[in-house]
């Protein structure tokens, strides 16, 4: 008989193994070490006490990993990963696990549930629709198979490391807002795993970028309006690439930000896949 329960720190090794098995045939390569897995959970704010697992005869066969935080002023759970191992799919495990989980989220005053799902994963999109999730944004994922050509920064721009997160200034450069995994809270959570560079003109910061060192995931990049289309953004990309020594990964860019999409395409990135951001009021 399949049973459901909330998770605890002792479940972490089993959760990692179940995650690898559940995503072994996923469209995106999700293979990662235990260390990388734990870094991912930390970035997403995952708390095991509001996450749940499905078990058959003591074996974990499915899970919901939930982050906790504030999203647009509302106490929100974020689905940092839902999976069911192949041999237990199409048996209602994800649906029943969700039904088990929601009352527990309400008990701790969580009012909203946020997730992302591949637009090509029609069964999952349909399931989340039936569960009451509605689409809030379309997000683009970009990849490149080559390093950005090394360039010199614009003559008037000085590139340097940034040690202090100046969110009021940084957010003044934004045209939209990042996804949960790239949010300001996520940047704070990754701590020393992040690298931040800024571009300066006359000692004033006019742009910045944040990359997660271990995975080369670009978390944020923004340039002040008056300094765009002058090579500042490309200089930031190049500096971050140099820091991690690898091709950068660009995840979950709001498709409504046409100028941002065009920037990444002009920088040599190609659209790899799309996701729906979806939200449910509990």
Image: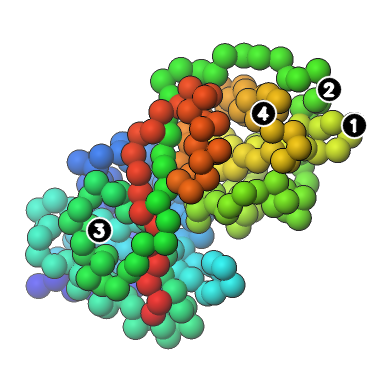
Residue on which the image places disc 3: 125
Residue on which the image places disc 4: 229
Q: Nearer the viewer, mark 4 or mark 3?
A: 4
Q: CA distance from mark 4 to mark 3?
A: 37 Å
Residue in the picture at 66% in, 14% down: 151
Q: Dot 3: within a 10 Å radius of its alpha carbon, few (fewer than 14), some, or many (20 or more) residues?
A: many
Q: In the image, which disc is placed on residue 202?
A: 1
Q: CA distance from mark 3 to mark 2?
A: 48 Å
Is tag 2's residue or tag 4's residue first in the polypeptide sequence? 2
CB-based contact (under 8 Å), mark 2 and mark 1: yes
Residue on which the image places disc 2: 156
Q: Quadrant of the N terminus?
A: bottom left
* Above or below: residue 192 compared with residue 97: above
Q: In the image, which disc is placed on residue 77?
A: none
Residue in the picture at 57% in, 14% down: 149
Is tag 4's residue or tag 3's residue first in the polypeptide sequence? 3
Is residue 204 in view from this perspective? yes
Residue in the picture at 42% in, 85% down: 107
What kind of element bears circle 2?
loop
Q: CA distance from mark 2 to mark 1?
A: 8 Å
């Amino acid at each position: 008989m399949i049973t459901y329960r909330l998770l605890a720190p002792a479940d972490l090794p089993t959760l990692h193994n179940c995650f690898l098995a559940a995503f072994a045939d996923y469209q995106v390569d999700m293979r990662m070490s235990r260390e990388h897995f734990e870094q991912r959970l930390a970035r997403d704010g995952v708390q095991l006490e509001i996450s749940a697992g499905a078990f058959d005869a003591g074996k974990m066969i499915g899970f919901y990993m939930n982050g906790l935080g504030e999203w647009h002023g509302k106490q929100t759970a974020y689905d940092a990963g839902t999976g069911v191992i192949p041999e237990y799919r199409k048996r209602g495990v994800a649906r029943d696990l969700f039904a088990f989980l929601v009352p527990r989220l309400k008990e701790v005053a969580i009012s909203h549930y946020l997730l992302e799902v591949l637009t090509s994963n029609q069964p999952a999109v349909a399931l989340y629709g039936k569960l009451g999730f509605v689409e809030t944004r379309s997000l683009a994922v970009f990849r490149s198979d080559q390093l950005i050509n090394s360039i010199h920064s614009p003559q008037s721009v000085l590139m340097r490391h940034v040690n202090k997160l100046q969110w009021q200034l940084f957010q003044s450069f934004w045209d939209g807002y990042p996804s949960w995994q790239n949010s300001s809270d996520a940047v704070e959570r990754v701590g020393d795993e992040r690298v931040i560079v800024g571009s300066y003109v006359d000692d004033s910061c006019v742009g910045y970028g944040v990359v997660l060192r271990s995975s080369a995931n670009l978390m944020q990049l923004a340039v002040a309006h008056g300094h765009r289309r002058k090579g500042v953004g490309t200089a930031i990309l190049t500096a971050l690439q140099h820091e991690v020594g690898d091709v950068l990964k660009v995840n979950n860019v709001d498709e409504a930000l046409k100028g941002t999409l065009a920037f990444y395409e002009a920088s040599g990135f190609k659209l790899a896949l799309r996701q729906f951001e979806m939200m449910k009021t509990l």
